[in-house]
Image: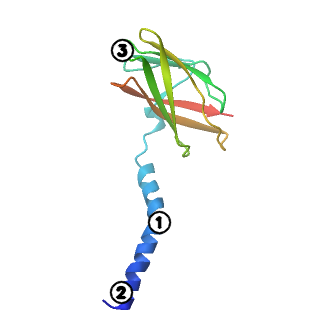
Amino acid sequence: MSTSIKAFFVIVALVAGFFADDALSWLNSSSKAAITDYCQLSTNACEKEGIAVTLNRDTAQPLIPIQINVDWPHSEADSLHLTLEGYEMEMGTARFAIAQINEGQYQGDVLLPACTMEAMTWVGKLSNGKQSIDVAIRMER
C-alpha cells in the first residue's frame, strides 16, 4: 500500500475520532423524551398509574432539601429509588432512597446539586423495584 493511501486513512481516523464524542452526543440528544412525558412534581399531587407523588414546595432549590411524599398502594418495597438526571444540561446522575413510613406511604428528602443555570429540570424514574414512573422536578435559584 502506498504511503499516500496510508496517510489518508490515518487522517480519516483522526478526524473521525475527534468528532466521535460530538456525534454520539447528538445521537443521544435526539432520542430524549419530551418534558411533558414526565410527571411534573409539585405541591399538587401528580398521579400516574395509581401512584401519587407530591413535594413540600413547587420548585426545588440547589443544595436545599425538598421533601418528597409518595402514596404507592400495594407496594411491598421497604424503600423507593429515585434516579434523576439534568434535562437541559448534563449534571450526572443523582440517586435517592425514599423510605417507607407506613404501608404504601413513602417519604424522603431530595438534595439537588448547584448548577450554573438560573433554572433547570431534573428528570428520571421513581421505582419500587418492580414498577417505575417517570418524574420531573423543576429547580430554580
Identified by mark 3, the residue type is Glu
Q: Which disc number belongs to residue 5?
A: 2
Above or below, 20 against 61 in this view is: below
Find residue 56 and report its horizontal and vertical position in percent: 60, 18
Picture residue at 45% right of the left edge, 72% below the top: 15
Identified by mark 2, the residue type is Ile
Find residue 97 and report its horizontal and vertical position in percent: 49, 25
**Residue at disc 2, secondary structure:** helix
Above or below, 75 against 21 in this view is: above
First-in-chain label (3 vs 2): 2
First-in-chain label (3 vs 1): 1
Find residue 108 and report its horizontal and vertical position in percent: 54, 20
Please state which of the two labelled residues, at mark 3 or mark 1, is closer to the viewer. Answer: 3
Find residue 67 and report its horizontal and vertical position in percent: 58, 20
Question: Disc 1 designates what residue?
Answer: 19
Q: In which quadrant will I find the C terminus?
A: top right
The crowd level at tag 1 (other Cα within 10 Å; few <14, some 14-19, many 20+) is: few
Picture residue at 51% right of the left edge, 28% below the top: 96
Above or below, 94 against 51 in this view is: below
User: Do the residues under discs 3 and 1 have CB atoms within 8 angstroms?
Assistant: no
Question: Disc 3 designates what residue?
Answer: 76
